[in-house]
Image (spheres, rainbow, N blue to C red):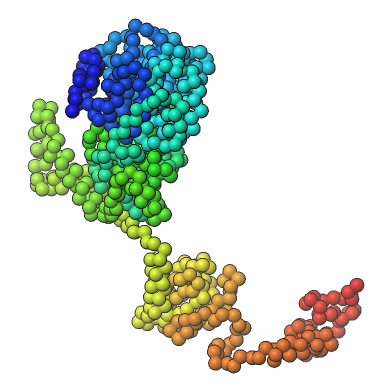
Amino acid sequence: MKTFEELGVSEEIRRAIEELGFEQPMPVQEEVIPYLLGNRNDVIALAQTGTGKTAAFGIPILQRTDARVRQTQALVLSPTRELCLQIADDLKDFSKYVSGINVVPVYGGTSIENQIRALKHGAQIIVATPGRLIDLMNRGAAKLEAVKNVVLDEADEMVNMGFSESIDEILAGVPKDRNTLLFSATMSREIEKIARNYLTDPKEIVVGSRNEGAEHVNHIYYMVNAKDKYLALKRIVDYYPKIFAIIFCRTKRETQEIADKLIHDGYNAESLHGDLSQQQRDLTMQKFRQHLTQLLVATDVAARGLDVDDLTHVINYGLPDDIESYTHRSGRTGRAGKKGTSISIVHTREKSKIRAIEKTIGKEFVQADIPSAEEICKKQLYKVMDQIVKTDVNEEEIAPFMDDINRYFEYIDKEDVIKKIVSLEFGKFLAYYADAPEIGKPTSRGDRKKKERTSDERKRTHKAEAGYRRLFINLGKADGFYPGELMQFVNRNMRGGRQEIGAIDLMSKISYFEVPEKDAAKVMRALDGTTYKGRQVRCNDADRDSKPQRGGRRDDKPASFDKKPRRRDQEGGERSERRRKKADGEFNESGRKDDWRQFFNTGGKDVKLVGEEPDFSEEGWARRKPKK
């Protein structure tokens, strides 16, 4: 492996990067730096995030910049504000001992007037987002006539964000006699198109394989039901007490909701998305880089290109729609040769995405089980014990108080003191996981149907407890019939107070419930034949006949199933006879002639009506006047 000196890096820059901890060049730096130090050398570099790309293009750009000339000589384009600031800060660090170099970042979301003033003072290197740079070009503040080096960092993301036309406009205003470097984690058709249009005979440098995932990242996924995703997230975070992670969400709204929930539940979390002001985003990133924030909940765009030291995990709160986004997400960890873990919380419908990502990045995902409450509590207990053991004691500061402390704990055993200290730190996890809801494993559609059939069979064959009778009712969950509704319905139809009810088994269309043996007949009489939400209710002894009676007219006699069916021609004849009698006025629709008079008879005497006799034979209504 070559050294930075052998690559041709100047002494001033070597001194600065050695102070930053650079010892040996990384593969992408070893390939790119000597090539870019030449003239008119265009490069397409395919490398994952965390492989040292910023130094790979930053060092040769700085070395080729003439500090005596105040004109802009180099331009770096990035997709986001955070990445723009990050690149500018890195270039300033690399040029610490190169006098006269001025690096100016320009980006949206902040005052353009301050940026114009900074550019007027002279900026040999501009690091910009496309939109703000075009605005400054139109105002005449950004002058690119002397630019010799152009870098497109995270070019695939700029294309995905819709900056293709902006890139075309910017590159049209830059001299053709320039070095152009295109950095991308993935190689798409759009990237190839930009390369064909704006790069001349470029050298393609690939670190690893095209579209390959980061080498030092482990990929794990947890399969849960969609409703359990947040509970699973909490368990995963609790299982890794020293976690320092970015949690990726799909939308700005989801990002803020998850961050708010975590903060409410006592976690050290912050959100990062496009709806925050630039000042809020800068403060959030400053706290996260200083490890004052443990969990950063972010969208893909806001966190693109972020370089944070010692990131242990990346958590995907649901997989992204495109594989390139997953590659960028997982590349936030496992940087600079360190190990990292990419965790994905997915539900059954996203399983196909896992296979597609595995095929593209060439890495295998490991399916893991959600940590149990016992496993989490053990991990947290070890963390507390480790903190107690490793706590440094300042003897001089604590010495004046030791007499009072010893006197206070004089009658308390050492074992009790340890228990109390551990409980003080560890109590909240014990309290939460003592009653924490279990997270069930998701099942396939076939397994669910089989489980439902088994459950229904068990409910149908269940025997009543001693002293109770098991009753059937033709109402179920599909009717909105749940335990509370069942008990209210029974009590509403029973006379003489509340009815005692035992075990209840609910199914989709029918239900079973138990009542004391002595009350069974009374309950069946009270419920059978009533209505519930327009549906006629059937209630009988489940052990004798658990099938609902479908249709038919309700009689006081028990239903008989051995009756011979009536012939259709016989029924048709009876209907014709009824229609004939009705037309002749022999009886009305009730089947008895003049039965309406019974309502006017008192004491066995007929009441004489005044006027024309009403006609009930038409449409069930009395008509005093003939139809016109």
Residue 160 position (above or below residue 133)? below
Q: Residue at x 46, y 22 (%)?
A: 171
The image quarter in which residue 424 lies: top left
The image quarter in which residue 18 lies: top left
Whether residue 415 is visible, yes or no, is yes
Q: Quadrant of the C terminus?
A: bottom right
Whether residue 502 is visible, yes or no, is no
Q: Residue at x 39, y 8 (%)?
A: 70
Q: Nearer the viewer, residue 628 or 237?
A: 237
Residue 617 position (above or below residue 31)? below
Q: Residue at x 39, y 40 (%)?
A: 324
Q: Position of residue 206 (x, y in %)?
A: 31, 33
The image quarter in which residue 583 lies: bottom right
Q: Nearer the viewer, residue 99 or 604?
A: 99
Q: Residue at x 37, y 41 (%)?
A: 326
Q: Quadrant of the N terminus?
A: top left
Q: Position of residue 535 (x, y in %)?
A: 58, 73
Drawn side of residue 211 relative to residue 420, left or right: right
